[in-house]
Amino acid sequence: MTYDVVIVGGGPGGYVAGIRGGQLDAKVCLVEREVLGGTCLNRGCIPSKSFFESAHRVMSVRDGEAFGVRARYEGFDLAACVARKDQVVGSLVGGVRKLLEGNGVDVLTGDGVLVAPDAVQVTAPDGSKTLVKARSVILATGSRPSEIPGLPVDGRRIVTTDQVWGLTDLPSRLVIVGGGVIGCELAHMFSAFGSRVVVLEALDRILATEDRDVSRTVAKVLEARGVTLRTGVRVAGAETGEAGVVVSLEGGEDLPCDRVVVAVGRRVNTEGVGFEEAGVALDARGFVQVNDEMETSVPGVYAVGDVVGQQMLAHVATSEALVAMHNALGKKYWMDYSVVPYAIFTAPEVASVGAKEKDLKEQGVPYKVGRFSFAASGKALCMGAPEGFIKLLSHGETGRVLGASVVGVSASDIIGEITVAMRMEASPGDIVTTIHVHPTISEVILEASEDTMGLSIHKMGRRKKRG
């Protein structure tokens, strides 16, 4: 079997590369060991956002009286939530398969191993083997949850962030080990569902990669909703039994609970797929080394997504995949990581793009800060979501927007405007002179842009003295 390109892995990097290859009239084969869509569609982005929406509905019912809605909350059915999630996932996975088929991509189910720079051996579930040859290969094997010593994952009492979306009975007491992005998202959702949640984080604060005022805001809201945040603590071990789990902390404290979710990051899938045997170079952390064309140390072999380790985000994998496929077909594209937005789906949401203020300080870059509170947003108040703020950073000399951090309702949606502004090398002045719909959440971007000049209309500033 000979192709122009063979792709190993069918996640948001692999299947997107396949579709683009088909659109460009290439003969493409995609190898996937499990289900199309990878972690994103099956065990990550989509399941978590389905749960996130369920949490939103629960909170809307509970807070309904303030909006004039008289409804009685009778409890949460996690099994029904999971069933709806499965329907959403199934619909999207089926859509991906149809898109691949419609673009002429051959899909093989099985384990793909790189046996030569131009060949992948596929072992099907029944043990049969097929050698697939191609002019170029794209590696998109993804990642899996990391585990930690002392917390033996059994898939029942102690689960990973891949397994948690399949639980059908709501734990009364839930311990989440890890206060990063996934840990905080889970804390928000399961506390809304009714679980008593404890988050254990080894660092001095949750969401440690974000600005301190962002993590402080999220922590304050989570605690107000009953989540217990324990920072600066480490897990020593855990014992499971029929009644639940007892988590032991370093120092001797024991925490009894019904379930534990291990949310301490992810590790890449580079073992057993022939990377090193084929000469594909890995860095000291185990990630595949690539150039800005997404090509590995082996000519004609490309890598995208989590195995590259730039940013473990589905939308980054998609962009990398488009670059890799175009180059695999003899075109010239380059990957640019300078403007990458991302979001954290807590309540309030968090979204960020570009530089952080601490980075600009450390680098000695002159900058201006524009801030605006969601509590002063008419739309946010109408929605009953006054928590949060936006911080907009611009260059002190050139005026170009350098980045932004947003914590507040719909942050994941409005960060796109700032991302486009950065790509267009726009300034806050360009945003200020762009009319925004009123009332909308996007107006906080307008107000923060005005604030970089000290001219925010709906924010009280220091009044200048006359004369």
Image (cartoon, grey):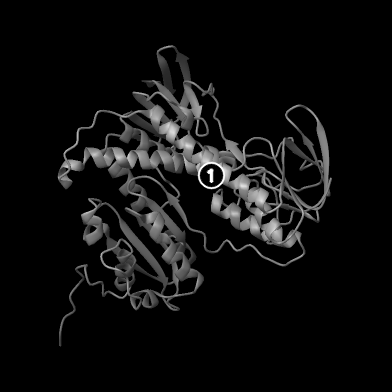
Position in image of residue 330 (x %, y %): 77, 64
* Quadrant of the image occupied by residue 220: top left
Residue 434 to residue 8: above or below: below
Position in image of residue 28 (x %, y %): 75, 51
Q: Residue at point 64% right, 35% down?
A: 34
Residue 131 to residue 384: above or below: above
Q: Can you name the residue that lies furthest to the top here?
A: 242
Mark 1: few, some, or many residues within 10 Å (few <14, many ≥20)? some
Res. 82 in view: yes
Q: Nearer the viewer, residue 13 or 422?
A: 13
Q: Can you name the residue that lies furthest to the bottom here?
A: 467
Q: Residue at point 22% right, 57% down?
A: 375
Position in image of residue 353 (x %, y %): 46, 60
The quadrant of the rendering that contains the C terminus is: bottom left
SS of the residue at dot 1? Answer: helix
Q: Nearer the viewer, residue 260 or 107?
A: 107
Residue 330 to residue 70: above or below: below
Position in image of residue 321 (x %, y %): 65, 55
Q: Which residue is mark 1?
A: 92
The reply, left or right, for residue 235 in relation to residue 76 is right
Image mark count: 1
Res. 250 in view: no
Q: Residue at point 68% right, 66% down?
A: 333
The quadrant of the rendering that contains the N terminus is: top right
The reply, left or right, for residue 299 in relation to residue 243 is right
Q: Nearer the viewer, residue 331 or 244?
A: 331
The reply, left or right, for residue 464 in relation to residue 396 is left
The reply, left or right, for residue 371 in relation to residue 62 is right
Q: Amino acid at mark 1?
A: Leu
